[in-house]
Amino acid sequence: MSRRLCRLEEIPDGQARGFVVQGAEHEVFVHRRGGSVRAFVNSCPHQGTPLDWVPDRFIAADGEHFLCATHGALFRLEDGFVAGPCAGARLAAVAVTVVAGWVELDPD
């Protein structure tokens, strides 16, 4: 069974929003670009800390990367690969889909 996170329109286009997932070790965040979404575990692969220093602030000033607020690592929006400190690491992807306007975690 999938779990609904929010309506797609509740995530501003080009932005990301964090979610607490019951039973998960870390929060997840979902990035929206148009009608598509990508999700990642909200944990820096280098520091183990959440990326956002203020709730739902995941996007770097350039608008092209996620930013780790703890140490400045930049991660590509499309795949979570590092573009800064801790090169070679990446954010852990989380499977999500949009179903009838709802952003949902895939069941596994």
Image (tube, grey):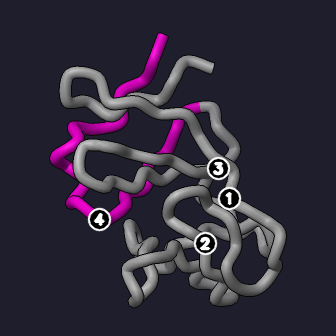
3D distance between C-alphas at marks 1 and 2? 8 Å
- Other residues around mark 1 within 10 Å, as few (<14) / some (14–19) / many (≥20): many
Task: Residue 47: say if magenta.
Answer: no
Q: Under tag 3, what secondary structure? A: loop
Residue tagged by mark 4? 14
3D distance between C-alphas at marks 2 and 4? 15 Å
Residue tagged by mark 1? 91
Q: Under tag 4, what secondary structure? A: loop
Task: Residue 17: say if magenta.
Answer: yes
| x 69%, y 44%: residue | 25
The x and y percentages for residue 46 are: 81, 72
- Above or below: residue 17 compared with residue 74: above
Question: Which residue is situated farthest in the top direction here?
Answer: 1
- Above or below: residue 18 compared with residue 81: above
The x and y percentages for residue 23 are: 63, 31
Amino acid type at image mark 1: Leu
Answer whether labels 2 and 4 touch (C-beta < 8 Å): no
Stretch in magenta: 1-22
In the image, 4: left or right of 49?
Answer: left
Query: Which of marks 4 and 2 precedes in the sequence?
Result: 4
